[in-house]
Image (spheres, rainbow, N blue to C red):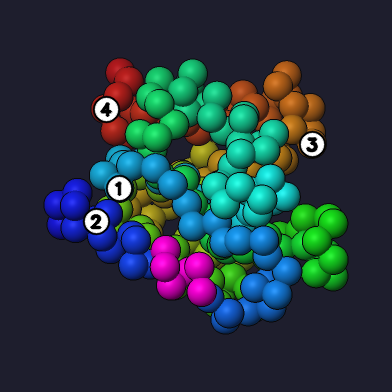
Amino acid sequence: MNTAEKIEQLKLIQNQVSQCKLCKLHTTRTQTVFGEGNPDAEIMFIGEGPGKQEDLMGRPFVGRAGELLTRIIENGIGVPRDNVFIANLTKCRPTVDLKFEKDRPPDEEESAACSPYLVRQIAVIQPKVIITLGNPSTKFVLNTKEGITKLRGKWGDFHGIPVMPTYHPSYVLRNGGENSPLKREVWEDIKLVLLKLGWRK
C-alpha cells in the first residue's frame, strides 16, 4: 500500500470512528480521538485512551503526559513527533461513572468495542515496531493478563510486528516525574527499540 492509499484508508476508519456508538463512552465524549502521525511510520505508540485535553482537542497525548511523550520522541528517539504514529486503544475518553471528571482505564467492554479500529490502523500503517504504553494497550496487543511491570523491556509480538511494552507517561508523572527511576526505565526500553530498528549502534 503506498502513502496515498494509506491516507485514504485511515480517513475511512477515522470517519467510522467519529460516528461510532458501539459502547457507552460515546454518550459523554466531546469528540473522538483517532490518532495522528506519519502513515508510513516505523514506530507506532499505543496508549490506553484519551484524557481531558485530548477529548477537547481531538488529538492524542496533548496533556502533561503528551508533553513527556513528545520529549521522549524528539529528544530521546531524535525524530519529530509527526514522524511516528500515536494512537490509543479506545478513541473516546473513559471517566469514572461516566461523570467526565476523573479519568480511568477503559473497561473490557469498551476495549472490545473499540479495539478493531486500532487493529485496522496497525494493518494500514504496518509499523516496524509497536511501543505499548501502560497496561490496557499492552494486555490487548500482546493478548496477555500479565501486568506492565513484568512485561516492560521484553519484546513481544503482534502478527509479526515486534512489540516493546513500557510505562505510560502519566504513570511516570504520578510516580516521581522527570527524575523518576521509571523514566530511566522507559529510556532503556526506547534504546532497545532504536537498536532493533538499527537507528543506534
Mark 4 or mark 1, earlier in chain = 1
Which residue matches tag 2? 6
The image quadrant where one finds the N terminus is bottom left
The image shows residue 138, relative to residue 183, as above or below, that is below
Please report contact status of discs 1 and 2: CB closer than 8 Å, yes or no.
yes
Q: Which mark is residue 174?
A: 3
Pick the front one: 130 or 98: 98
Looking at numbered disc 2 in the image, what kind of residue is underneath it? Lys
Q: Main secondary structure of the magenta part?
A: helix
Residue shown at 26% from the left, 27% from the top:
198
Rendered residue at 47%/28% (across/down):
73
Q: Which residue is mark 1?
A: 39
Q: CA distance from mark 4 to mark 3?
A: 32 Å
Per the model, the C-alpha gap separating discs 1 and 2 is 6 Å
Q: Name the mark nearer the viewer: 2 or 4.
A: 2
- In the image, the segment drawn in magenta is 14-19
What residue does disc 4 label?
198
Q: Earlier in the sequence, mark 4 or mark 3?
A: 3
- Distance from Cα at disc 2 to Cα at disc 3: 36 Å
Q: Earlier in the sequence, mark 1 or mark 2?
A: 2
Tell whether 185 sits left or right of 190.
Answer: right
Say what secondary structure mark 1 lies in: loop
- Asked whether 153 falls inside the magenta stretch, the response is no
Quarter containing the C terminus: top left
User: Please, what is the three-letter code of the amino acid marked with disc 1?
Assistant: Pro
